[in-house]
Amino acid sequence: MRRAWYRLANEQANGIAWPNMIEKGSRAENRICAVHFPTLATDRLQRLHGLSGRAVATVEKAKGASFIASANPNCGRIGIAAGQTLAEARALYPDLVALPAEPEADMAALTRIARAADRFTPLVGIDGADGLYLDIRGCAHLFGGEAQMVDDLLSRIRRQGFRVSAAVAPTPALASALSRHPLPGPATPIVFAADQREIIDRLPTEALRLCEATTAILLRLGLKLIGQVHAQPRHALIQRFGPDLARRLDQIEGFDDEPITPLLPVAPFVAERRFAEPLMQLESITASLAPLAAQLCERLQRRGEGALQLTARLFHTDGAIHDASVGASAPLADAVRMVALMTPRLEALAERVEGDSGVDIIRLSAHSTGPLKAAQTDLDGHANAKANLTELVDTLAERLGASAVQRFCPVDSHWPGAAPETIPAAEVPAHPWPDHALPAPHPDVAPPPPDRPLRVFSAPEPIRTMASVPEGPPIRFTWRKITYQVAVAEGPERIAPPWWLAPADGAAPSDAQDDGFLPAPKRALQTRDYFRVEDTEGRRFWLFRQGLYGRETTQPEWFMHGLFA
């Protein structure tokens, strides 16, 4: 499944036929390229501080002393190696440039290189703190073969100032071992399944990636090569060293699977285009995006899906990468709208894109998709209005930010202030209101009056009332210094707060504060009795009484919460 999308994307974008064989191996044979950075930390510091030609080492502290963590080749020529104390290294070479070790910065640099290697294959994983895995099965023919592909990869990395070695093999363990423990022969070994056992037996025992204690015992026993370990009875090795040794042997031979975890999730739909000459202008990049969007939409429509999250990745010839990501509020399979949504993000990158070395690969990916519902145009234009609203939401969200455009969503709560909530308009609500929440009334039956007012105050406002009985409706109330005489009253509609939100240490619960009404802690969970009242002038109000008389309070309070039309 992970290969199908990449094969189809490159066939359509480049017009290259899919071969039945991958060089000497079959299409089912795994092809893993392992890349090793022996001096990643010092190479990064040399590039950062301009220390080319200097002896550079990184230092870390342990047990109250400073030790050399890594050293560049210039240090090796004068006898400085990892594990020495800083004092010993200074004695050998006083001009040594010793800088603190920064593992997090080294991993960040390795991650940037891994993202740049995404131009060769989307399946790029991290191999420890100084290596990468690239699953290149089905990709090498796009670059003229595995040898040409690896040479291109290594030359791009070396131009950034990093020392690097690589190997290609059917298993990740064997490829990693060859990149770290090269054998006599080609600088970049390429091994196929038919020859791997012979190559494995020639590798040193250290290539099995065992713990230091186990490796030291094997070397003391004279088992310096993996072939010598293979010659020993398997059950005796397991009894002496445990199952880890047998598992490592099975992994390097391919009997035990060792999956590669991609650095980035693999998009289910991808369209890609490569250019013989780099694109230097934003207009050219935007124009090249249109046919890619058309290809992507064609495949989405065949699957009955639409894109919810789109990313245009621009690969530069110098290894830089720029991403432009956009989201859609509804599944999208319209190439024109895709380009329109992507254009503002590309314009924001214009200075960086046009100031770099030029774009030679553009990849358009749909990372998140949703079912694409078939729409039929109706005569009243409601369907078109809904589509136009969706387009407006997407445009505003991309220009103003996803959080700047909000929509109301219902919440299953009787508490009036907690019934609605706002979410970004581009997001799909978890429980949307149905298109027809209630059946249409019979034309001969008058619709019932609304239960809720059209205007609800964000914070209820206190009022003074006079009632005939303590628990009855008001007969007169004063709001904003104006007195109203009640003619008709409906109610009460009793709404109790959630019982599970009892305040801790006198604190009011969060749901009781959602409507902006901040009562005192002692009355935070009091019941509300809502009344719909109409005054003598025909104005209708939504009032509530806070607290049950005689049970929750001795003096209930009244508040104005909304106005009817």
Image (cartoon, helix red, strand yellow):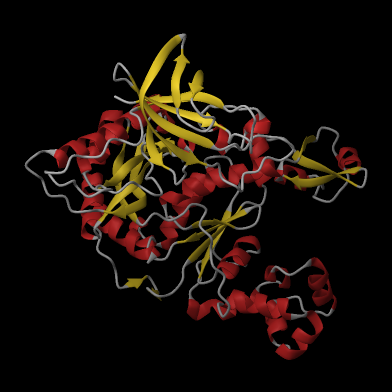
Q: How many marks?
A: 0
Q: Nearer the viewer, residue 115 or 510?
A: 510
The residue at 42%/53% (across/down) is 120
Q: Quadrant of the C terminus?
A: top left
| Side (left or right) of 251 relative to 62 | left
Taking the view exactly as shown, the residue that stands out farthest to the top is 481
Taking the view exactly as shown, the residue that stands out farthest to the left is 379
Image quadrant in which you'd find residue 8: bottom left
Image quadrant in which you'd find residue 202: bottom right
The residue at 39%/64% (across/down) is 2
| Side (left or right) of 551 relative to 490 | right
Q: Nearer the viewer, residue 462 or 422?
A: 462
List x then y, in percent, for residue 534.
34, 24
| Side (left or right) of 352 relative to 16 | right
203 versus 231 height, above or below: above
Question: Do we see residue 282 in this rendering?
Answer: yes
List x then y, in percent, for residue 421.
44, 37
The residue at 23%/35% (across/down) is 287
The residue at 47%/50% (across/down) is 117
Q: Quadrant of the N terminus?
A: bottom left
Question: Do we see residue 318 in this rendering?
Answer: no
List x then y, in percent, for residue 391.
25, 35
Taking the view exactly as shown, the residue that stands out farthest to the right is 64
Q: Nearer the viewer, residue 483 or 272?
A: 483
Q: Nearer the viewer, residue 465 or 73?
A: 465
List x then y, in percent, for residue 510.
59, 37
21 versus 470 height, above or below: below
